[in-house]
Amino acid sequence: MGKYVHHVEARYPSDVNALVFDHSYTKYQCTRFIVGVAQWPASEKQGAPYLFDRYYTEMKRIAHDAAIFADKADDDVKVYLRSIHLNPIKDKTGVCPVIDWRSPVVMDGYTHIIQKAVKEVNRNESISGGKHVEFLDTRFIVSPMWDNAFDWVHFAPKINNVEALFMAAVLYENILN
């Protein structure tokens, strides 16, 4: 059973669409996708952060595109929209006015938005989103360590490894069922 991982760089929700899913499915035979885009939208990188309504619109589109893609592609396809990692409060998030919006409160808000988008696509009877699109929650692994980032952004490899192992177990379990 030759399974492997293919990484697609996606910084913003606009980087994730049906064409990205289709390319990975067609070229690499990917049937499981994990989407996690929030750090850049909440940052000052593009000038201003995505407000919650904009982020919700984008995540709802991703969930919808994923469900439609999966419906057309294969019954075995699953797309997971994962919870967003918390960031430590630092020089740009802990000042007034805030420069960078990647604070725990905003990241939690983004995670709730993802959950809402997944629930909404799963209730859509015109597509079988619930069969193909799920919320993947890793907060129980990474959130207790939210202020432990060695560079105030990225988690230590031990934390990343535990999260990756958990996600692999979820993917593997769903392949078997």
Image (cartoon, helix red, strand yellow):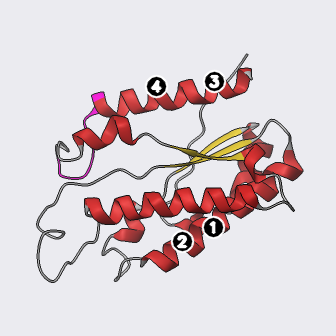
Q: For the residue marked with disc 1, what is the amino acid?
A: Lys
- Mark 3 in CB contact with mark 1 (< 8 angstroms): no
Q: Nearer the viewer, mark 2 or mark 3?
A: 2
Residue closest to the eye, 102 or 19:
102
Q: From this viewpoint, which residue is outermost toward the top?
A: 1
Disc 2 or 3, which lies upstream in sequence? 2
Q: Nearer the viewer, mark 1 or mark 4?
A: 1
Residue closest to the eye, 27 or 120:
120
- Residue at x 37%, y 77% (from the top left corner): 49
- Mark 1 in CB contact with mark 2 (< 8 angstroms): yes
For disc 1, the marked residue is 60
For disc 4, the marked residue is 165
- Residue 129 appears at what percent x and percent y? 76, 53
For disc 2, the marked residue is 56
Tell me the tag on residue 172.
3
Magenta span includes 154: yes
* Residue segment shown in magenta: 151-158
